[in-house]
Image (tube, rainbow, N blue to C red):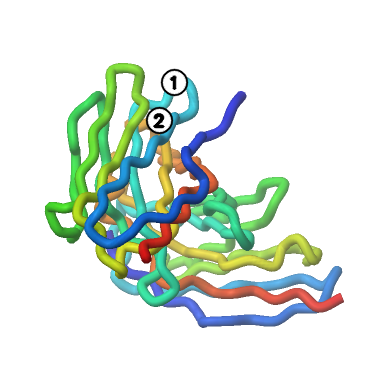
Amino acid sequence: KAGVTQTPRYLIKTRGQQVTLSCSPISGHRSVSWYQQTPGQGLQFLFEYFSETQRNKGNFPGRFSGRQFSNSRSEMNVSTLELGDSALYLCASSMAGKDTGELFFGEGSRLTVL
Amino acid sequence: DAKTTQPNSMESNEEEPVHLPCNHSTISGTDYIHWYRQLPSQGPEYVIHGLTSNVNNRMASLAIAEDRKSSTLILHRATLRDAAVYYCILWGYGGSQGNLIFGKGTKLSVKP
């Protein structure tokens, strides 16, 4: 079956702009989470959505937001971009509620802020 | 979910076994031990997970200490494709991903 799909794969923005990233989970997966990965901080949790509701949120400023649609697809938005937002943004889906809790990650969207 | 401790890096020779350690002294009774790895320019991929008993799958084996305060991921015959960053994380049953702490992981280098 198709894996987790993230678009776009690469993008370049300038400070002050905003960006929207998209994630299509594996069919049947209802939980979608987002992570930010930078060389200095590693993988950091942004937020998790389940059935269109934000279930948990990491320690990021309000400029970072997200949403999930009825088909489980998810988007995250970063407004007023800063240089420090340059990172690889990863989306992961899972069948929430199962004891395996296995996460399936996409290949990520690499954002460069100039 | 508790934090884990892993060595920053390890080296191995191709076709030799690799033992990647992970300490999780504050693990709770409902925490599953998960391992993921991240190949260069890719998102992390699931490797294996377990609760109390040792586990085997086509990719690796997971050896869990009797007191569950440590575990070891075993790659039986390392290949060049196994060069990656390996993350050991704890995930409580039914728990939110918001509690997952990936840390920096162990960067495994495999020499031909």
Residue A64 visible in the current orientation:
yes
Q: Which residue appears at 27% of the width and 29% of the height?
A: A68
Q: What quarter of the picture does the N terminus of chain B occupy?
A: bottom left
Q: Mark 2 and mark 1: span between their CA atoms?
A: 7 Å
Label 1 SS: loop
Q: Which of A61 and B33 is in front in this view?
A: A61
Q: Which residue lies furthest to the top in this view?
A: A70
Q: In which quarter of the image is residue A91?
A: top left
- Name above or below for residue A13 compared with residue A3: below
Q: Given the image, what chain letter belongs to the residue carrying mark 1?
A: A
Which residue has dot 2 on it? A95
The type of residue carrying mark 1 is: Gly
Q: What quarter of the picture does the C terminus of chain B occupy?
A: bottom right
The spot of residue A98 in percent (x, y) is 39, 32
Number of residue marks:
2
- Position of residue B8 in the picture relative to residue A60 (left or right): right
Query: In the rendered structure, are the residues bearing label 2 and label 1 in contact, judged by CB atoms less than 8 Å apart?
Result: yes
- Name above or below for residue B44 compared with residue A33: below
Q: Given the image, what chain letter belongs to the residue carrying mark 2?
A: A
Label 2 SS: loop
Q: Which badge, 2 or 1, is on the more N-terminal residue?
A: 1
Mark 2 nearby-residue class (10 Å; few <14, some 14–19, many ≥20): some
The type of residue carrying mark 2 is: Met
Q: Which residue appears at 42% of the width and 42% of the height?
A: A92
Q: Which residue appears at 19% of the width and 39% of the height?
A: A55
Task: Nearest to the eye among marks 2 and 1: give it.
Answer: 1
- Name above or below for residue B32 compared with residue A77: below
Q: Which residue appears at 37% of the width and 55% of the height?
A: A13
Asked if marks 2 and 1 fall on the same chain, the answer is yes
Q: Nearer the viewer, residue A51 or A9?
A: A9
